[in-house]
Amino acid sequence: MVQKNRAAAGGDIPFGVIHTAAKPLWTPDSWRGLPNAQEVPYPDREALDAALEKLRSLPPLVTSWEIERLRQHIAEAQEGKRFILQGGDCAETLADCRAEAIASKLKILLQMSLVLVHGLKIPVVRIGRFAGQYAKPRSSPTETRGRDTLPSYFGDLVNSPDFSAAARAPEPRMLVRAYQHSALTLNFIRALVDGGFADMHHPEYWDLSFLKRASLSPSLREEYEATMRSLGDGLKFMEALGERTLNDLTRLEFFTSHEGLNLLYESAQTRRVPRREGFYTLTTHLPWIGDRTRRVDGAHVEFFRGVRNPVGVKIGPTISPDELLALCDVLNAGNEAGRLVLITRLGATGVEKILPHLVERVQRAGRRVLWMCDPMHGNTITTAAGVKTRSFAAILEELDRTAEVHRQSGSRLGGVHFELTGEDVTECLGGAAGVTESSLSTNYATVCDPRLNYHQSLELAFLLSRRLSRPAF
């Protein structure tokens, strides 16, 4: 029976995928026809087919050996030997594929990781929400302004934010344009890293202009500079021992991630590679499934159960322990280390009511997972003026409560997931910079969700580093 199904599908069962009566043979297209939340209705099927054929013919954006290396890092993070820092824009735009914008996001992730390395005393894996974060889920497929109702803006992978019928119509050519801009972004990132941009011998190169701004408190500036000096001195001491130049420490790696929302885009770049088993989706190193699309019998879970990439899942407050275990069973049928990342987004007030039961269920079943915390999405609020924002205090509170639940459960918080930017934006309330409701309009630049600015991001890294480096943790 298995042989018959394999022949009918035209391929072998990917490594790690179990073929049972309940789960038919997986292929890169076996998700089609299943419930597909957030599916985009493309009106021009001929243009869509042409765009997908073009995507299939283009080179991959990432490589299988990079993906396998990240899987190993995640496996080590599951054991407490590494920590994961994941961050970047809520939604990239094609217009922001600029050297300055890309470099600023890299720099703030570098700075945050420097602080975490100093506090946790373990390597930090840096994963950027860039080079592919062009699709966004929406709570409604349409948007109404006055008497006009149009399709919602689903990100630059699909349509444009301008509120007009032409801009909001799903455009298949955007799939190829997003691929091209992802390739340009990755090319620039790799050039920066290979050129020594991320060399820990020279962390002073990572300084953002905000370190000289009057708005940055002298104490925070001094704390970062002291951290930088301490790590630099430690590196020189290790090399003075004469053993070797510690390349793993001095030349840092970057990996990419995005929500695998548009399965047409993802499956078009999914393929076998020479000398490896199974299929890889080569749009990114770490795709994740959103809280809106994590239905166990849905299209997104079906697609991502069959790829060799590590896969993340956003875990919101509506999930039950049994549903979470079912997701673990489907997405990591072989219970492999480094495969599955559970990213909780429960809100500051929901952590203690929900998370202990989820952790206990996964632990009791012996499932290998990496627990991460996304303290952004569960703490989104709307001001009296109708502005979407997030509170720095609530973000920090969710992180603190999540870490404490894991500590008490004998589990481990192995990473964090932030929406942030290296720009001088005013989108999230609070922090030492003192963003207030009245100052949100100063530079509210996001096209979707509010992001931490440079100051808030660095401050949060210091606070998180102190919390996680406590002996009790």
Image: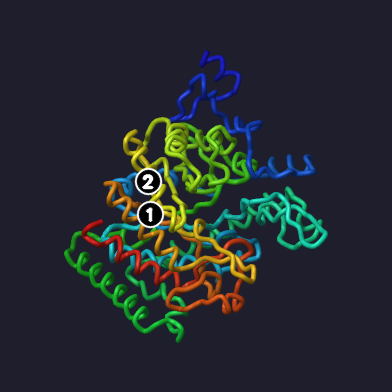
Frontmost residue, 45 versus 388: 388
Up the image or down, 331 lies above or below 370; here it is above
Residue at x 81%, y 56% (from the top left corner): 165
Mark 2 and mark 1 lie on one chain; the one further toward the N terminus is 2
Give x and y (percent) for residue 234: 23, 69
Residue 397 shows in this picture: yes
Closest to the observer, 188 or 409: 409
Q: Quadrant of residue 473?
A: bottom left
- Tell me the crowding category of disc 1: few under 14, some 14 to 19, or many 20 or more residues within 10 angstroms, Cα based: many
Disc 2 residue type (three-letter)? Leu
Which residue is rendered at x = 69% and y = 56% of the image?
153
Please state if 140 lies on the left or on the right of 451 as rendered: right
Q: In this orientation, does residue 176 appear?
A: no
Asked whether 102 or 63 is in front, the reply is 102
| Image side of residue 180 versus residue 391, left or right | right
Secondary-structure class at tag 1: strand
Badge 2 vs badge 1, beta-carbon distance below 8 Å: yes
Identify the secondary structure beneath mark 2.
strand
The disc at residue 415 is: 1
| 2 relative to 236, above or below | above
Residue 102 circle label: none
- Rendered residue at 28%/52% (across/down): 407
The residue identified by callout 2 is: 370
Specify the farthest residue to the bottom: 214
Q: Amino acid at mark 1?
A: Gly
